Image: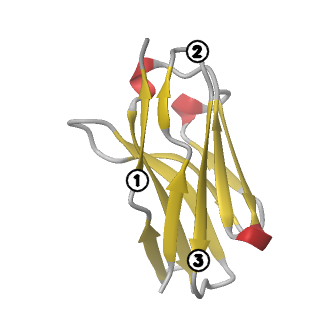
Amino acid sequence: QVQLVESGGGLVQPGGSLRLSCAASGSIFSRNAMGWYRQAPGKERELVATITNGGSTNYADSLKGRITISRDNAKNTVYLQMNRLKPEDTAVYYCKLEERYTSSAYRNYWGQGTQVTVSS
């Protein structure tokens, strides 16, 4: 069973930075993608960024230029560096690991979420 543990959330002032981490443990299929999604109150969960085990990245258009996703495959850990944070970035940030068996077969695992609040 795969488990994901997120850390790094908290309260930050507008314009500030945060770095989120997500460590995966358990038996993880080698071909996978890890990523971050977020959900603000009253809104649907949305993509923030993903990165494959090969290093290919995908970013939400609205966040490009302010965020960077990276991963350490040896540690099965993904990071999200967020800069110039805005109040509208306030949300619960969820880590996801997607095991990709074939082009159409995959399995998702989710972390419990970490709260990010941007406020003065």
| CA–CA distance in space, label 2 to label 3 | 33 Å
Residue at 20%, 36% (x, y): give it.
Answer: 42
Is residue 42 visible to us here? yes
Query: Which residue is situated farthest in the top direction here?
Result: 120
Assess disc 3: are there few (<14), some (14-19) or many (≥20) residues with their C-alpha within 10 Å of its C-alpha. some
Residue holding disc 2: 15
x then y, percent, for residue 97: 53, 68
Q: Upstream in the sequence, badge 2 or badge 1?
A: 2
Residue at 57%, 79% (x, y): give it.
Answer: 100
Assign a secondary structure to mark 3.
strand
Assess disc 2: are there few (<14), some (14-19) or many (≥20) residues with their C-alpha within 10 Å of its C-alpha. some
Q: Upstream in the sequence, badge 1 or badge 3?
A: 3
Looking at the rendered structure, the kind of residue marked 1 is Gly
Residue at 44%, 63% (x, y): give it.
Answer: 111
Classify residue 20 by image quadrant.
Answer: top right
Q: Is residue 41 left or right of residue 15?
A: left
Q: Upstream in the sequence, badge 2 or badge 3?
A: 2
Q: Which mark is residue 25?
A: 3
Q: Is residue 45 above or below residue 120?
A: below
Q: Is residue 69 above or below residue 51?
A: above
x then y, percent, for residue 106: 49, 80
Q: Is the C terminus in the top left, top right, bottom left or bottom right quadrant?
A: top left
Assign a secondary structure to mark 2.
loop
Residue at 69%, 83% (x, y): give it.
Answer: 30
Q: Is residue 29 above or below residue 19?
A: below
Residues 41 and 4: in front is 4
Q: Which mark is residue 5?
A: none
x then y, percent, for residue 99: 55, 78
x then y, percent, for residue 28: 61, 83
Looking at the rendered structure, the kind of residue marked 3 is Ser
Residue holding disc 1: 113
Looking at the rendered structure, the kind of residue marked 2 is Gly
